[in-house]
Amino acid sequence: MSASNSKNVTICMSTSTASTTVTPTAITAAKPAALTVAASTVVAGDLVFVDKTGIANLDGKWWIAGTGTTATNIELLGSDNTGGATSVAGGAVFNARSGVGSMECLCLSSFAINRDTPGTISTATFCDPSASVPSVVTQAGTVSIGGYVDVAAADFKAVVAADISGAKHQFRVTMPNNGYIVFEGVVSGFSYDIPLDGALAWSATITLSGAPRHLF
Amino acid sequence: MSSRAVRQFARAAVATVGVPYVDTINLSQSTPTPVWCTLSFLTYGTEKLSFCDDREETGAISLVFFGAPGAGDDSILQAAEAAAAKFYAYVDPLKAVTLRTIGAPIDYISAGDVPQFAVQIDFEYSHVS
């Protein structure tokens, strides 16, 4: 294992809920799996949401279209359908977030994923003062992001709008030669840092809807 | 050494200060009658600001004023402080270079036969690119 520099890492956020819907007709029993479609505009690197295919480990998740994606095949980077079904249920749907018009890449100065540890509920008794059970309430965690105030920049305005809307957004972190991190969450807690001498900065928190997934 | 953008900014700013400016960096110049001024540059370093490769160069621009020898310090300081205030107030039209601080005048008195009396005022700058 060797370390990789963070140079050329890009962090992009969906800015539109508009989606392209395509219906798959088959899936390869392979790793990565590829969905067969009549025709799609999905290209490699796009975020795609897979649902209602009947393939349990694919449905309800965001994926990255792999480099094997074509007009009639959508390769799901990081997926594994080895030995699985090759037919999909009717009514399967994809919502694509492509890089053009529906994603805004953010010029962040800081980015950190903070996963929450499962909580516990004390069931202490006089016989066992330290007894506890796992809480059924679990949270995926948060992502802390920060950048510099620039009202002329599209990415700054996109983050501000996301904080105001309170809507879910999808995020894609592209790591050169190391795949992608994909997650969904709500931007909140937008705040400003105005130092006496230095750059005007902002910070915000993304509350995760689910665990971030590293696809490669 | 500072980047070209910083030097261009400083040369545009010094043109507004009302004291004759002479570029003395790698040039052979004949200097005018005091008071006149020149510029020198020092870079502290460069820091990466974001994942988009925005960078901030920081350093100091020195504005050096030369006055007549044997004429005391008050007249040159008066000219230097007035000019430095104008230099500090100059705003980069490209908004890339910002003068962050203005220093106190530092006066130099050379030993022996002093050809001119010099006062230096330093400005710390930030250049984002």
Image (spheres, rainbow, N blue to C red):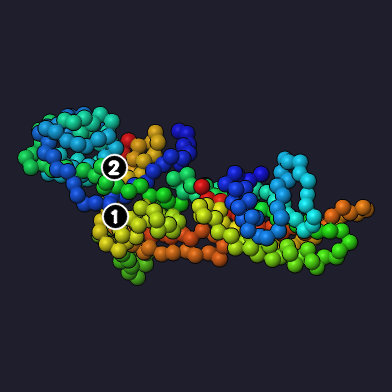
Tell me the crowding category of disc 2: few under 14, some 14 to 19, or many 20 or more residues within 10 angstroms, Cα based: some
Rendered image quadrant of residue B117: bottom right
For the point 31% across and 60% down, the residue is A161
The residue identified by callout 1 is A185
Farthest right residue?
Answer: B112
For the point 32% across and 48% down, the residue is A104
* Disc 1 element: strand
Q: Which mark lies nearer to you, 1 or 2?
A: 2
Quadrant in which the N terminus of chain B is drawn:
top right
Residue A91 location (% of width, % of height): 7, 42
Tell me the crowding category of disc 1: few under 14, some 14 to 19, or many 20 or more residues within 10 angstroms, Cα based: many
- Number of numbered markers: 2
Where A216 falls versus A127 (above or below)?
above
* Disc 2 element: loop
Where A57 falls versus B12 (above or below)?
above
Label pair 1/2, CB-CB below 8 angstroms: no
Please report, as a chain letter, where disc 2 is located: A
Residue A208 shown left or right of residue A84 in the figure: right
Q: Nearer the viewer, residue B119 or A112?
A: B119
Residue A83 visible (yes or no): no
Residue A99: give its label.
Answer: 2
Rendered image quadrant of residue A138: bottom left
Q: Amino acid at mark 2?
A: Gly
Farthest front residue?
Answer: B33
Q: Amino acid at mark 1?
A: Gly
> Along the polypeptide, which appears first: circle 1 or circle 2?
2
Please report, as a chain letter, where disc 1 is located: A
Mark 1 vs mark 2, CA separation in Å: 18 Å
Q: Nearer the viewer, residue B87 or A193?
A: B87
Residue B18 location (% of width, % of height): 68, 60
